Image (cartoon, helix red, strand yellow):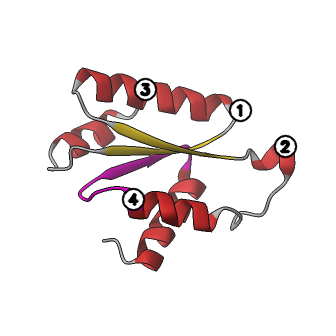
Amino acid sequence: MHICAIATYRSKTSRRLGFYGVKDLWYSEQIEAGLAEFALRHEIPVQTLHVANPIEGIPRWNDGQDELDGWLRQMKPPFAVMAAHDPRATIVIRACERIGLN
């Protein structure tokens, strides 16, 4: 996990984390493991949402938006979300905008 991301997170007041990952994708699993280790060390709860691997099932990028929206709505602000990769992070940002989270 990037040191800059951890330093930025630690300077904020949110004490809840989320991970938006991709099922059966090695680098998603590694990023999640790093986040889980950090969270455990700092006693921060982590909620996860895993979506289907687009390489295997070839779903469209916008598939699962309702599931993501619901997951984000049930998280109590303030919280931070780490995504498996930049395109998924963009999807999270757009979902937050769509449902009115800042």
User: Pointer 1: what residue?
Assistant: 24
Q: Is residue 56 above or below residue 65?
A: above
Residue 99 point in image, percent of width and height: 43, 76
Given contact means CB atoms under 8 Å apart, are the residues at marks 1 and 2 in contact? Answer: yes
Q: Does the magenta stretch include residue 93?
A: no
Task: Answer left or right for 56 relative to 42.
Answer: right
Q: What element carries label 1?
A: loop
User: Pointer 2: what residue?
Assistant: 56
Given contact means CB atoms under 8 Å apart, are the residues at marks 1 and 3 in contact? Answer: no
The residues bearing labels 1 and 2 have C-alpha atoms spaced at a distance of 9 Å
Comparing labels 4 and 1, the label whose residue is closer to the camera: 4
Q: At 41% across and 64% down in the image, what residue appears?
A: 73
The amino acid type of the residue labelled 2 equals Glu
The amino acid type of the residue labelled 3 equals Gly
The residues bearing labels 3 and 4 have C-alpha atoms spaced at a distance of 24 Å
Residue situated in front as seen by the camera: 42 or 70: 70
Comparing labels 4 and 2, the label whose residue is closer to the camera: 4
Q: At 69% across and 68% down in the image, what residue appears?
A: 62
Mark 3 vs mark 4: which is more N-terminal?
Answer: 3
Comparing labels 3 and 4, the label whose residue is closer to the camera: 4
User: Pointer 3: what residue?
Assistant: 34
The residues bearing labels 1 and 3 have C-alpha atoms spaced at a distance of 16 Å
Mark 4 vs mark 2: which is more N-terminal?
Answer: 2
Task: Answer left or right for 100 relative to 55.
Answer: left
User: Pointer 4: what residue?
Assistant: 74
Task: Answer left or right for 99 relative to 59.
Answer: left
Mark 1 vs mark 3: which is more N-terminal?
Answer: 1
Which residues lie in the magenta part?
A: 74-85
Mark 1 vs mark 2: which is more N-terminal?
Answer: 1
Residue situated in front as seen by the camera: 24 or 10: 24
